[in-house]
Image: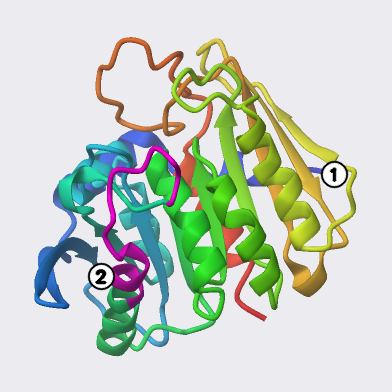
Amino acid sequence: MTSPIVKLILGALTLAAAAAWASAAPGTSARTLQLKGASRSYIVFAPKAKLSRPALVVVLHGRNGSGAAMLKRTRGTFNTLAQRDDFIVAYPDAPGGAWNTSHASATSGNDDVGYLSALIDALTTEFDVDPKRVYVTGFSMGASMSYRMACERQDRIAAIGPVAGGLARGLMAACAAAARRGIPLLVMHGTEDPINPSDDGELEGNVQYWIRRNGCQPYAAVTHNLAGDIDDGTHTYAAGYSGCKDGADVQVWSIEGGGHHWPGGDEPMRPGNGREIRDFDAAVVIWDFFKRHPKE
């Protein structure tokens, strides 16, 4: 019997198709949001047809990035999927390219939780977004910010999909104390990530912490070994933790040999970031996870 992940990979959009849509699709616009006297910028994609209670996916860039850079990094795949499955995608900008993740190394003191909450509110009103289907994903520092949003806005966030980044250790106690519901989590991380090492205690702690937070069984089952058709020197193991409260699954895609990259992405050439990951498109996997996990 073919597993759901195998079906997903076999049915995934090609990177070329995603890139073509990103450059040609109508419905992408640059905007600003006024918050506490400051102007915050973002990009939004909305399918041309009027949608009925669409989902919203917020995609957060990494350090020194931007919403436009994240749209390029993901090859517009979220936009392609949104056109196909009728949802809204937002790519916010962090001032100075840095999110306030609450890590000790964080350089930003901005109220990014407030900004992203206001952005979600504004888009929910404009597009009549289904409040049970608001999701956040992000890369590197954006991944860390997605964790923080899940901790501090669990009333709004249905599920998160962080890639190559983790929750700040200093937020874990408060996040656990405030937890009122399980929040589904899909993690992707390269085992040879030189920027945010996957064997770092904080990052490993993120997964174990979230398993406990969601009340999952402590032992994982390997759902699928993904070798892929592209010889990129990586091998991905997808492990799932079941029995979680509120149906809040935890799934971990561990990419053996993978570096600090968005899988299947259009990556900027940065020496020292490790091996690129080409066997699958992270956006396709993340959206498939999200659409199966509306807020209970």
Question: Where is residue 87, by image quadrant?
Answer: bottom left
- Residue that appears at 48% across and 23% down: 277
- Residue that appears at 46% across and 47% down: 143
Q: Dot 2 corresponds to which residue?
A: 46
Q: Which quarter of the figure is the C terminus placed in?
A: bottom right
> Above or below — where is 289 with respect to 270?
below
Q: Which quarter of the figure is the N terminus placed in?
A: top right
Question: Tag 2: Cα neighbours inside 10 Å, few (<14), some, or many (≥20)?
Answer: many
Element on which disc 1 rests = loop
> Above or below — where is 77 with respect to 19?
below
Rendered image: mark on residue 206: none
Instruction: Give residue 122's position: percent from left, percent from top.
Output: 26, 82
- Relative horizontal placement of residue 294, taking residue 274 as reference (left or right): right
Question: Where is residue 136, by image quadrant?
Answer: bottom left
Color theme of the render: rainbow
Q: Dot 1 corresponds to which residue?
A: 1
Question: Tag 1: Cα neighbours inside 10 Å, few (<14), some, or many (≥20)?
Answer: few
